[in-house]
Amino acid sequence: MVRCEICGRDGAYFICAKCGSSVCSQCYDSELGLCKSCSNISVKKHPLLFGDTLLLGVFLIMLGMFVIATASLISSEGGGIIIVPPFFIGTLKGTSVLTAIVLIISLIILFLMFLPWILEMNRSFRKSDISDQENVILSGQEYIITLRIPDCREENVEVEAFNGRLTIRAYRNNRLIFERSYNLPHGSNASGIRYRCENGFLVVRVTLDRKGF
């Protein structure tokens, strides 16, 4: 049984892409492919553009003051000012000012109405994707493969070994959504296969029987 090098739990089927440590699913960041320790270091080394929300707020306030000052200079001769971020400024007079304002407000409202739907569709699309991220570990007499398959269920998984090759298939609604084959280590046969789904990952453990031993 492989133990996590961070918390000591059993089931360390994930390998950090940076330090090479074997960790469990609780100590593994699937988005970055790193263990918890390396993930924290990576986040610190890549801060946000402004570093802090306060600095971002100050920047936006200064930008707003600049736009207002520019608009005041342009409108000194009369008329209305229409500002379309970031820096497109136009001068309108008469009823065209009211028409432009109504049009801009309508577009903003329309965008806000559809924004939740767009975000939800994007989130659902990401969840339905099967990541190419995988880990393969050879630990003693065990060949361990970890695959990221969202909404994975053991009853929808099929694993078979034949002629030195291991084939993994996953189904959803009776349709094949994933299939991948692996070559077992040279001179080995699969004497036992176990698999389970855990936190959106499929963990396959193959017990190897070395030929000639």
Image (cartoon, grey):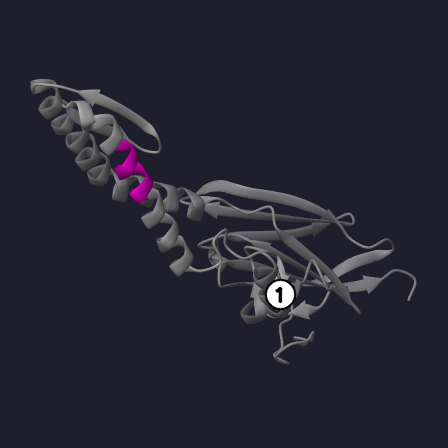
Is residue 108 found left or right of 65 in the rendered image? left
Where is residue 162 shown, x and y percent of the image? 73, 49
Q: Position of residue 38 (x, y in %)?
A: 64, 65
Quadrant occupied by the C terminus: bottom right
* Relative height, residue 93 to residue 147 (above, below): above
- Residue in the image at 37% along x and 54% along y: 58
Q: Which residues are magenta?
A: 64-71
Please give the name of the residue rendered at 31% of the width and 39% of the height, measured from the top-left corner. Answer: 118
Dot 1 falls on a residue whose secondary structure is: helix
Q: Main secondary structure of the magenta part?
A: helix
Report which quarter residue 194 is drawn in: bottom right
Residue 195 in view of the camera:
no
Q: Is residue 27 above or below residue 183?
A: below
Q: What residue do we see at 55% from left, 47% from top?
A: 131
Measured along the vertical axis of the image, is residue 192 above or below residue 95? below
Whether residue 30 is in magenta: the answer is no
Tell me: 209 left or right of 48. Answer: right
User: In this orientation, which residue lies closer to the viewer: 172 or 77?
Assistant: 77
Q: Position of residue 182 (x, y in %)?
A: 72, 48
Mark 1: give few (<14), some (14-19) or many (20+) Cα within 10 Å.
few
Residue type, label 1? Ile
Is residue 192 visible from the viewing direction of this image? Answer: yes
Q: Residue at x 38, y 46 (%)?
A: 123
Q: Nearer the viewer, residue 7 or 58?
A: 58
Residue, disc 1: 41
Q: Nearer the viewer, residue 167 or 12?
A: 12
Depth check, front residue: 29 or 160: 29
Total number of numbered discs in the rendering: 1
Q: Quadrant of the N terminus?
A: bottom right
